[in-house]
Amino acid sequence: MIEEVSRIQAEALAAIQAAASTEELKALRVRYLGKKAELSQLLGQIGRLPPEERRAFGAACNQAREAIEAALREREEELRQQELAARLEAERIDVTLPGTFMPRGHLHVLRQVWERFEEIFIAMGYEVYDGPEVETDWYNFEALNIPKGHPARDAQDSFFVSDEVLLRTHTSPCQIRYMQSRAPALPVRVIVPGRVYRRDFEDATHSAMFHQVEALVLDRGITMGDLKGTLLEMARALFGPETQVRLRPSYFPFTEPSAEVDVTCIFCRGAGCRVCKGEGWIEILGAGMVHPTVIRNGGYDPEEVTGFAFGVGLERVAMLMYGIEDIRHFFNNDLRFLRQF
Amino acid sequence: MRVSIDWLKEYVEVQEEPRQLAERLTGVGVKVEAITPLNQGVRGVVVGRVEGIERHPNADALWVCTVDVGRPERLTIVTGAQNVRAGDLVPVAVPGATIAGGKAIGVAEFRGFRSEGMLCSPEELGIDEGGDGILILPPDAPVGADAAQYLGLDDTVLELELTANYAAHCQAMLGVAQEYGALTGQTPRWPEPRVAEGPDPVTGAPDIRDLIRIRIDAPDLCHRYAGRIIRGVKVGPSPGWLQARLRAAGMRPINNIVDVTNYVMLELGQPLHAFDYDRIAGREVIVRRARPGERIVTLDGQERVLDEEVLVIADGEKPQVIAGVMGAEDSEVRPETTTVFLEAAIFDGINNRRTSRRYGIFSEAASRFSRGVDPSGVIRALNRAAELIVQVAGGQVVAGVIDLYPRVAVPRLIPVRLRRLWTVTGLALEERQVKEYLERLGFAVLPAEDLLFTPAGEEGAGGDGDGAAGGGEAGGADALAALAERDPVWAAMARVSPVPADPANRSAWLQAARQEIARARETVRPWAADEAGGLGAVGANPRLDVAIEADIAEEVARLHGYNRIEATLPQGPAVRGGRSPQAAITLRARRILAGAGLVEVMTHSLTHPRVFDRLGLPADSPLRQAVTIQNPLYEERSILRTLLAPALLDVAQYNVNRQVRDLQIFEISRVFHPRPGETLPREEERLGILALGQARPKTWDQPARPVDFYYLKGVVEHLLDSLGVPREAWRLEAGTVPFFHPGRTALLFVGGEEVGCLGELHPDVQAAWDLPGRAYLAELRWAPIVEAVTEAPGYTPVPRYPAVGRDVAMVIGQEVPAARVEAAIRQAGGDLLEEVRLFDLYQGPPVPPGKRSLAYSLTYRAPDRTLTDAEVEAVHNRVRQALQDLGAELRS
């Protein structure tokens, strides 16, 4: 009978090896290991054997059973892997088809530059402030040391609402408004981004409306070196860590000393190119030490504190950063333009 | 201002190349905008004399000239110009020469005549001087000489772009020389005019006062007026050197008298005016305000109507000059003029500027007066002009100067603290350096002690009344000499700028100087205690733009070099920066909207008054009350907008015209509303949203999503939810707004307050902007939304027990708004109802007309236990009952 067990085992192992699907394996399991299987039936006849042979026969049966069991498991895993591979292969898709469309919005390019300015200065402890766009002559001019008849009024040709009210020509009136709201607290560190208006005919470089960022710092012992250092920080944050700044003497009624500020040309990195007319420098803003009259008008004592201020045109900076050649792009709001940023 | 380098060399040594010179001037703030070589390629052109001229036998328009160019042989030259006469001196491009632009001139044939070269027009020499014909040279042009050299073309001009402060003194060659001298350590050579005076050769009168009377009726507008008379001049063309100087400066030579006045103006910065003395009616000059309706024909041939705002120089009959702006033809120097009355005056800058702008006359004189001319230089300029007139036009200067000086100017005395200069500039300069820089710029610098110390006899002087001392000072020179001897401050005041010679003016000068000194000493007194040792004092400057300590700081810093200021950062306690909470919310809102696929636009605040009609606003709409610009440049930028909608519609139209038809845009920006009784309008931030076309195109995996009311509403809801405006803080209601579709518009209420509307644009308005398809628009007041944002809304525990879902479908009348259905569900569902979501909506067969099918998915949950089927069934039945009560026919 032991020979019979060996035969069955051999037959079963061969059949398992030959099975082509897990379904087939299930049938083989029943056939060779089920209650009605030959092996089970043989084992049921164990009583017919002489007692001394029974132990050996039982062991042989169990061994065969285990061998079949192992073969079934092994073959089953093989087949499962094969079937999974086949299914995954069949599920292959075209990954190059476009992904589901998600509408992408955009912040206006000027807003992005505006926010950059805010981030740079907030990190240096500046507050962000704004005031009215329609201003009194006093805030826009008088308080900033630009009395009536001052030639500087020519350079800032204004839209008037009445004799004493106009659209602000710069964000500088907010120097006064902010100081008045803070005095006598120190230090003053504020930036004012906002809209300004000039009575200019519109062309590629002029717009009746544009944006400025004003900065004002006031404290005991503020120097022109602090102005230069702050401008350097700003320029590097905007245009890259290698950027240098250059101050040239200039004139603004509300600062003294005053400076025109150049940065390393961002197109040629200072080597000289068409944009900077071979100079290696590009003028970006006007700055200076706050005029004592302005400090006084803001409610502080110019004997006690000094300060610096500057104002930079957002459009100018954006035009430089992105190589935009016409200021009108910003306000035409052509979506083919806005979607590039 | 155009600065000839050649001319500059008369006052200072210039070794550098033009480019370096320009860089150095720019470095101290005198910005050189362009460097222009005057010679545009003129080579080998010589001065020739036309000895004979005949009409070309074969061509009426041509002339054949015989020309002496200083060679043994004469040249035959054909010209088409009609202004050449025998005897004229002309520039001749002999064969082999080149003219402006580099064109070579050779021998050419003109209808049978060989032309050995060419007579040159100004244009052919690169001289910008209008007019037709050949350039006729002055009589002093040497035949055979190089014409380019004679005309001063071998020169380079620096074009300055002057800021308002430097414009005052750098619109003069000597001002520029002073700046360059300060850079290079040179004192410029000032001209020292010598005037040979004598009695009037015509009448024998000993003094100018016998020939003319001058009166200033408006001392507020004319601060100084001085005059001289020159007899027996011969008016004619100026010599070559003078013409060359004027041309280099961009001015056209007129005649020798006018040219001298212009030359002196360019040299010293003091505008002058020359009158034909014989045409001054009544032999009197009155400086006064014009009478209303008075008229003057200015030199440009225009008749100008005057009024009291205009200062004129009048004779006994009528205005002859708009003071400091432009003269009249009447009294202008002309060829037959023999006697010149020469004026040098100081006019009020503000009034001058106003007048020149008003008449649109931007003359060289006005450009200087409007920026300020140094009153102390008047007499020097007058004498310089008199000297030069005699030199170039002959004549005799009548003895004496009339000098009316109602607003006597004294140098400013500016006390300066060294430590303060350090603070402001960030430069730790020694007193010695500061002194040197300032002296190079023409200031006189005094040591501190000189100001701190008040010499005996000066106490209490100054300020007002100057009685006793004033009497003594009438003596003039002696009084000043005595003061200067015992007080170095007086010496400095006298040294730095000329003291008037006229006894009355001198006395006034002394009095003003005394006040200035007293004021300075008063300023210094309180400083002495803590600033001693660091105190320097600067006196007496000729620069009108330097008035306070900070101005001195700039002077020192710019000469030392801004580039030598070390970059530092403000010291002091760390302070918290940041945006206001409102601005931070607005920033977040912009990002939310962009994240939802919208594009931010920035539109003009200024708009066209007709937008209200285009929107179809009723005549009495308060939105028509706009802030109006008094001096607009374009009508479409002549009022401030009162709402955002038109600008967004403009953006839509602009894009549609460029085939961009799908746009979802937004802007958060200001509108402006006048406030009766208030100076300034109310400025209100608004959110505007406009949607047109498709929010999502058809793609291979999704259908297109055209925008509609619900898209717009979704954007608004998403924004409010994302910002943290609680649902219970706002609601939408159907409403009507003039330019919106009456059936497709909702009003948004936040905190019970109406903040704006959203909806479909009215078809008429859509047509007015020529938009394809339907446009959806929202315009919301922004502040109430920001106010309603709840930054920290508190916390509800995450559910621990399972939820149970139930659906309910119904057919219900279309007139029942979805909001009512939902409200009924929520009310009946009570606390156990967690979520209600409309998942299906259907109209049309088989649903009966006037009805629609709605299907909701409901979620039930209790926070503290697992709901039993029985509990859910009970509450769901209440919901079903509520819906039936509302008239719904339940389908499930």
Image (cartoon, coloured by chain):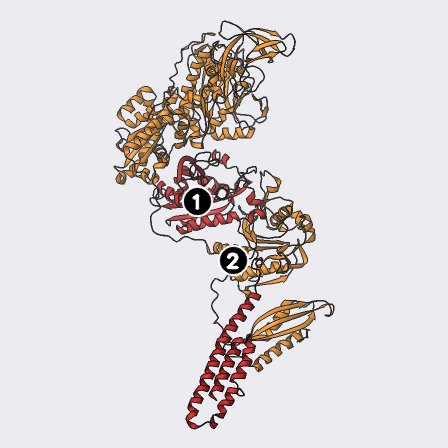
> Dot 2, crowdedness within 10 Å: few (<14), some or many (≥20)?
many
Can residue A329 be seen from the camera position used here?
yes
Note whether A312 is above or below B342 in the view shown: below
The one of B303 and B222 positioned closer to us in this rendering: B303
Is the residue marked by circle 1 packed among few (<14), some (14-19), or many (20+) residues within 10 Å?
some
* Residue A269 horizontal/vertical position (percent): 43, 40
Which circle, 1 or 2, is nearer the viewer? 1
Where is residue B200, by image quadrant? top left
Q: Decide: marks 1, 2 in contact (CB < 8 A)? A: no
- The picture places residue A252, in percent across and down from the top left corner, at 43, 37
Which sits in the foreground, A190 or B527?
Answer: A190
Residue position marked by numbered label 2 in the rendering = B786
Figure colour of chain A: red
- Which chain wears orange? B
Residue on which the image places disc 1: A239
Query: Toward the viewer: A53 or A255?
Result: A53
Is A338 situated left or right of A268 in this image? Answer: right
Q: Is residue A256 visible?
A: no
